[in-house]
Image (cartoon, rainbow, N blue to C red):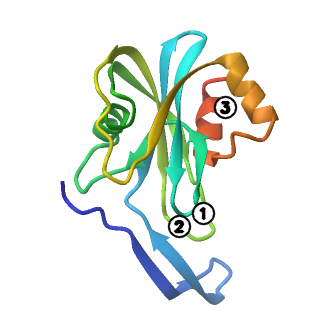
Amino acid sequence: MARRKIEFQRNHKVKLPNGHTISISVINHPGAVVITPFLNDNTLVMIRQFRPALKKYIYELPAGTLDPGESAITCAGRELLEETGLKARRLVKLGDIYPVPGYSTEIIQIFKALDLTATSPQPEDYEIIQILPMTRGEVRQMFKQGKLMDAKSICALAFCGWL
């Protein structure tokens, strides 16, 4: 696998449309995907993953960063397999989001995964993941209780009409 390039620029000068020049810090990001894997009309697969930056587990959908030269749809299939062991016969793009436009160039592409086949998960060494099939009611309850806080997952679920 080629090394992903995420670059931090401190004190980057930007000229604004009003003519003013400001200094900002920016994370240049290659882009990412998030996948909503549907087992059926009322059940999808979420994950509970340990996030070292937060030092805790969070609930989210499978997701990942694009490798150099990799298409978003290829990345979506790769991440779905790695994190859940599921292969999708169909991946449908639902839209794009800017997760943190104040300081990052990242664009996350949202996919819906359908016609799934189960195999074995193939997580990276740093990924500690529990696979959780959940119904629409369970997902909504988790959101209402404040247990679902991952922004990309919330957006993807909203694109699917689940929130």
Image disc number at residue 101? 1
The amino acid type of the residue labelled 3 equals: Ala
Q: Where's the N terminus, which quadrant?
A: bottom left
Crowdedness near tag 3: few (<14), some (14–19) or many (≥20) residues, C-alpha within 10 Å:
few
Q: Are marks 2 and 1 in contact (CB under 8 Å)?
A: yes
Image disc number at residue 158? 3
Of circles 1 and 3, the one toward us is 3
Task: State the CA–CA distance, disc 1 to disc 3.
Answer: 19 Å
Residue at 29% x, 26% y is: 120
Q: Does the rendering let one see residue 159?
A: yes
Query: Which structural element holds mark 2?
Result: loop
Q: From the image, tell me which residue sits under label 2.
A: 104
Q: Where's the C terminus, which quadrant?
A: top right
In the rendered structure, which disc, 1 or 3, sits on the residue that comes first in sequence? 1
Task: State the CA–CA distance, disc 2 to disc 3.
Answer: 22 Å
Residue 53, by quadrant, is bottom right
Crowdedness near tag 1: few (<14), some (14–19) or many (≥20) residues, C-alpha within 10 Å:
few
